[in-house]
Amino acid sequence: MGTRRVLVTGCSSGIGMAVAVRLAKEKGFKVVATMRDLEKREPLERVAGDTLNRSLEIRQLDACCEDSIRECVDSLQDRRVDVLVSNAGVGMIGPLECHSVSDMQGLFDTNFFGLVRLVKEVLPDMKRRRSGHIVVMSSIMGIQGLLFNDVYSASKFAVEGFCESLAVQAMKFSVKMTLVEPGPVGTEFERKVYEDAEKMDLAGADEETARIFREIYLPYSRMVFNSLAQTPEEIAEQTLQLITAKEPPFRHQTNRVYMPMTALKHADPTGRLPLDTFYKLLFKHDSLFTASLGLLRMLQKRTGKSSN
């Protein structure tokens, strides 16, 4: 197989930047690293090093604008995209009552419709060539909903349903699809989401809901983040393995310690088991929650060692 052209979105920081740089350093890839605002390109240029303008080029692409996507793809030789890595996304946490519908629509415009626009642009050519790989950065929250992540989780559920439906058609044309499902990742994206949450105006929520968000959800989320977060580079390395695999999986959870939690959903068709488990951990057995994090942290370290 010759050099494959990879189009990566959301490369100004975090996972997108790490994936673009990791692939550019691997023989056999030509990376088109895109971002909405080219004024934010300097950090990517810095970490790209000698791959810049050799195996990595930076271009403008706004996933919320069909014209921007088309212009970017039109600028590529033969409009060829061998691998699409759809990564651009935004976050949102907090009580539902505190979010405006317009903000929710904006999140879906990026997280869901951004993906739809990208796939609409590149899939027809992949089908004609009967070759291609669409890699989508989803989330563990596309499998299991999480308290105070209602809208973000809904957008990722939409992503998962869209890809699961489309994957069957793609197979007929020898086009591969893969959903990458990270848990918490230590990026500027996630830090900004939690910083905003700390300063969030909770006037729209009732007193008890506001208290649960401030006194239970945020501290617990901080513990989870500090205990279990992966680095963008870990996600990038796993993404490389998926792209180079002869038969890549449709779904890939990057953090193995979350697998027992997502397995709860499939263990009980009524859906009560995961709901009851998370409810009890959060509201009735907080000491067990803390102990579970310690156990999960040990498992993560052990898993990391065994995979090295």
Image (spheres, grey):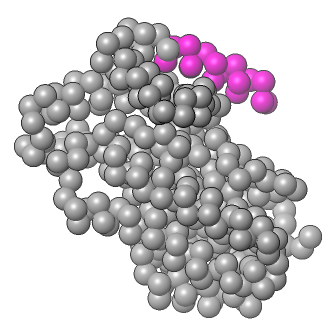
Which of 216 and 264 lies nearest the eye of the viewer?
A: 264
* Residue 272 left/right relative to 6: left
Determine the residue located farthest toward the right in the rendered image: 1
123 magenta-colored: no
Q: Residue at x 17, y 48 (%)?
A: 97
| Quarter of the figure with residue 54 | bottom right
298 magenta-colored: yes
> Where residue 226 appears, x then y in whole percent?
45, 27
Dominant secondary structure (helix, strand or loop) of the stretch shown in magenta: helix
Q: Residue at x 71, y 78 (%)?
A: 81
| Quarter of the figure with residue 148 | top left
> Where residue 216 appears, x then y in whole percent?
27, 24
Residue 271 position (above or below residue 188): above
Residue 125 position (above or below residue 84): below
Residue 180 position (above or below residue 286): below
Which residues lie in the magenta part? 293-308
> Where residue 142 appears, x then y in whole percent?
50, 48
Which of 267 and 2 lies nearest the eye of the viewer?
A: 267
> Where residue 125 appears, x then y in whole percent?
72, 84
* Residue 180 left/right relative to 306: left
Q: Is residue 102 visible?
A: yes
Q: Residue at x 30, y 66 (%)?
A: 105
Determine the residue located farthest toward the front in the rendered image: 270
* Residue 217 left/right relative to 144: left
Look at the image and tell me in which quarter the C terminus lies. Answer: top right
Q: Residue at x 32, y 66 (%)?
A: 106
Look at the image and tell me in which quarter the N terminus lies. Answer: bottom right
Residue 196 position (above or below residue 287): below
